[in-house]
Amino acid sequence: MAMEIAIGVASFQGDVEEHLAALREAVKKIGVRGTVSTTRLPEEIESVDAVVIPGGESTVIAKLSSYKKSLDVLKNRINEGLPVLGTCAGLIMLARRVYDRVVGETGQPVLGVLDILVERNTYGRQRDSFEAQIDIPALGLKSFRAVFIRAPAILETGPGVEVLASFADKPVAVRQGNILGTTFHPELSGSTVFHEELIRLATSYKSR
Ligand code: GLN
């Protein structure tokens, strides 16, 4: 029987439901045997083959100290190769350095596994939220509908980071080995390519 993969959505805070729905659709599309569920407790994080960290508010996620153990487990597992997709605040959680125009380096607790410098709330108030059609050559996509909601910007990328897509001269989708990150919300785009990509990474991770 084909192997079954377990995909978790880290449900500390943020738009969890949309990711669950996108993952379920992606599982069907690819035709793998997969379960999709929320993951919050350390033992739940220990048992998945891939994880999504949704958008929301990175400072809130980081401050939920009751989940400190969960975040430690998550960090260790990602460092050991667990495939992860971080979107918006989830990308901020993955970043090695977080910057804010008002306070400079925010010093907020993050997982620090993705070698980027990210700036929070780059697009300011008047463009709090917007959509843009972007090309994602690395995934063979043209005119992908990218939804930005109080989005961060990636200001610097380390040598191990591949830029998958850019918008307005800044990277908006990146990959570093098992780590995928977007400054926008792929779960709201009507396309499940990023979730499918995560599932593919999970399949090879599980059969390694
Ligand atoms: N502005 C939020 C933060 O800094 C991110 C917004 C989002 O995830 N949509 O954490």
Image (cartoon, helix red, strand yellow):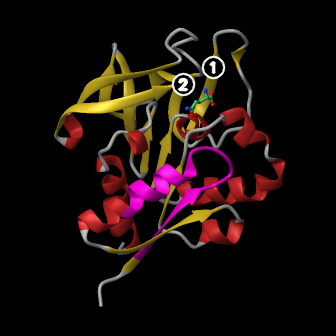
Q: Which residue is mark 1?
A: 99
At 44% from the left and 39% from the top, the residue drawn is: 181
At 58% from the left and 35% from the top, the residue drawn is: 89
**Disc 1 on helix, strand or loop?**
strand
Kindly indicate whether the residue at mark 1 contacts the one at mark 2 (C-beta within 8 angstroms): yes
**Residue 179 falls left or right of residue 96:** left
Q: Position of residue 196 (x, y in %)?
A: 31, 56
Residue type at numbered disc 2: Leu
Q: Which residue is mark 2?
A: 117
Magenta residues, start to end? 5-24
Residue lying furthest right: 66
Please tell me in which quadrant of the rendered image residue 142 appears. top left
Q: Position of residue 113 (x, y in %)?
A: 56, 43
Q: Position of residue 27 (x, y in %)?
A: 33, 66
Residue 38 sits above or below residue 98 on the image: below
At 34% from the left and 68% from the top, the residue drawn is: 203
Quadrant of the picture in which ligand 1 is shown: top right
**Residue 121 falls left or right of residue 84:** right
